[in-house]
Amino acid sequence: MLAFEFDNLFVRELPGEFSGVRKPRAVEGALYSRVDPEAVAHPELLAWSADMAQRLGITDDDVESELFAQVFAGNRLLPGMQPFASNYGGHQFGNWAGQLGDGRAISLGEVVGADGARWELQLKGAGRTPYSRGADGRAVLRSSLREFLCSEAMHYLGVPTTRALSLVATGEGVLRDMFYDGHPELEPGAIVCRVAPSFIRFGHFELPASRDDLPLLRQLLDVVIRRDFPHIQHADTQDRYGAWFRDVAERTALLMAEWMRVGFVHGVMNTDNLSILGLTIDYGPYGWIDDFDPDWTPNTTDRHGRRYRFGHQPQVGFWNLQRLAMAVAPLFDDHEALNDSLRHYADTFQSADRDNAARKLGIGRRDDDDALFRDWLGLLRDAELDMTLAYRALASFGPGDQPEAFLASDTFRAACYSDVRLQSQHAEAIDWLSRYARRIAEDALSAEQRQQHMHAANPCIVPRNYLAQQAIDAAGEGDLSVLHALQRALQTPYEENDLTRPFMARRPDWARDRPGCSMLSCSS
Ligand code: AMP
Ligand code: MG
């Protein structure tokens, strides 16, 4: 029987708003609004995460029951659920946007899982809330499938992230103007149940701060520290707040380093989309690096300013942390604690990024390798090489190998998008490989050990946009096999095996300029 043990600490301990009215409005003095999901026509379970189900203490039979699809489409509530939409603000593309809130996400409650951990269940696309601002509160299949697939993939890549329990089709059409060109079309709707210890964002703190509601800001911070940062135990309030902000800064820095390691571009790093726990959250027009281009952004809305381009993400993380620091500053007696943690962000990122660079190249961390790292990235860009495949190929290059032979090998060729571009960088490539051969010879690792290290830091598959798009196209025709195969393969992203091999290919030419594969709109 499908059941959970709920302990709804957030709604129990913090002020909310209980009118139950969905009408869009400013909600003051409250951190959430009680609101139920809106029922949908024909829920159908399309995919689910067995690992997440197990952590939540539910069985395969529970998941396959009719009740499961009803509950995770928002049609039925289980005992103990107290649905709510939370209230937050945010800086969008650098500008303060005021109140935003969960416009289409509705939290069902906080489960204490089989492993004793706390997991909040949240339906994305569950209907209108007071924060919907005139929009429909729904989500389309293509964006929901992308969130389901990518958030689970991130977990197996070892990158901090919100998880996804289920992907349920609603059986209803949702009207979207995907290209913003005045031609809206009905698309199939779907709902993801996403799961995380906490969905608190930077913007949750910014909103009460912007309204000078310091009592509410303090209440929020105290509960967040107690619930989401239980390891912070300082008796002194100022010490506790200081340790908390330092922790947030550190987690954010580590997250940025991880995104850079795997080639993930979030696409909408507004402060309302940054998790206080340093989790990847709000999968929208995100993208994965195919050919290595630090200036690439997948988000059409970001095409001109490129604020959220791949290579700029660590700086944006810092900018967002500065906004958070300013929001909580009124609670701090001494702002030096905040400044010190901002410096800690920069140091933590730099150190993690260097560690990752060394791990990805299979060399020990040394201070004199910066030029080697920099020139490798330059080569990836200038020779138009596939980031994921180039690192995997490099793992098969040894100190005794001839650079020329390596450049001609099938493994390396699989990472090349353009013969012309590669040819133009031939001399640079030979030079770099010769330096690399000398460098790896200086480490004590055997070829086999080095390859193992490199394979552990460099995935052989990531949920590239074109792969997700193939799963979406097939699902649109009623064929879920592509989604399921991709989902399974992405559970072992560092292993070359029968599941992953079919997806170990660079972006095909047809996907270069196709919507969904190269650029994505925010319409979702
Ligand atoms: P995002 O850019 O997806 O992070 O969303 C920014 C804000 O718009 C958040 O407050 C969302 O809840 C809200 N939002 C996005 N799409 C919808 C929708 N279809 N209906 C209601 N609110 C939405
Ligand atoms: Mg958002």
Image: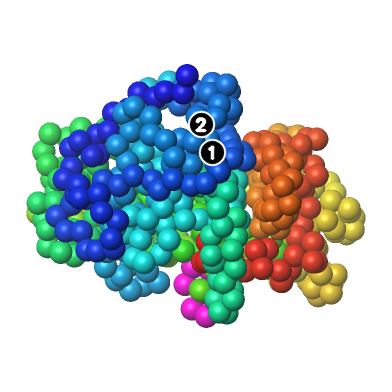
Q: Is 522 included in the stretch rendered in magenta?
A: no
Q: Is 214 in front, or is 188?
A: 188
Residue 218 showing in the rendered view: yes
User: Which label belongs to residue 42?
Assistant: none
Element carrying mark 2: helix
Q: Is 295 in front, or is 50?
A: 50
For label 2, the residue is 68
Q: Which residue type carries mark 1?
A: Ser
* Magenta range: 303-310
Element carrying mark 1: strand
Please provide percent x and percent y for residue 21: 25, 54
Q: Is residue 450 left or right of residue 108?
A: right
Characterize the local packing of mark 1: few (<14), some (14-19) or many (20 or more) Cα atoms within 10 angstroms.
many
Q: Is 304 included in the stretch rendered in magenta?
A: yes
Tell me the distance, in whole angstroms, between the alpha carbons under discs 1 and 2: 9 Å
Residue displayed at 40% across by 48% down = 38
Q: How is the image coloured?
A: rainbow
282 in relation to 300, above or below: above
Q: Is residue 58 left or right of residue 404?
A: left
Residue displayed at 46% across by 35% down = 71
Q: Main secondary structure of the magenta part?
A: loop
For label 1, the residue is 166
Q: Which residue type carries mark 2?
A: Phe
Q: Is 248 in front, or is 480?
A: 480
Residue displayed at 66% across by 46% down = 458
Indicate which quadrant contains ligand 1: bottom left
Q: Disc 1, disc 2: CB below 8 Å?
A: yes
Please provide percent x and percent y for residue 509: 80, 66
Question: Which comes before the other along the chain, label 1 or label 2?
Answer: 2
- Displayed quadrant of residue 230: top left
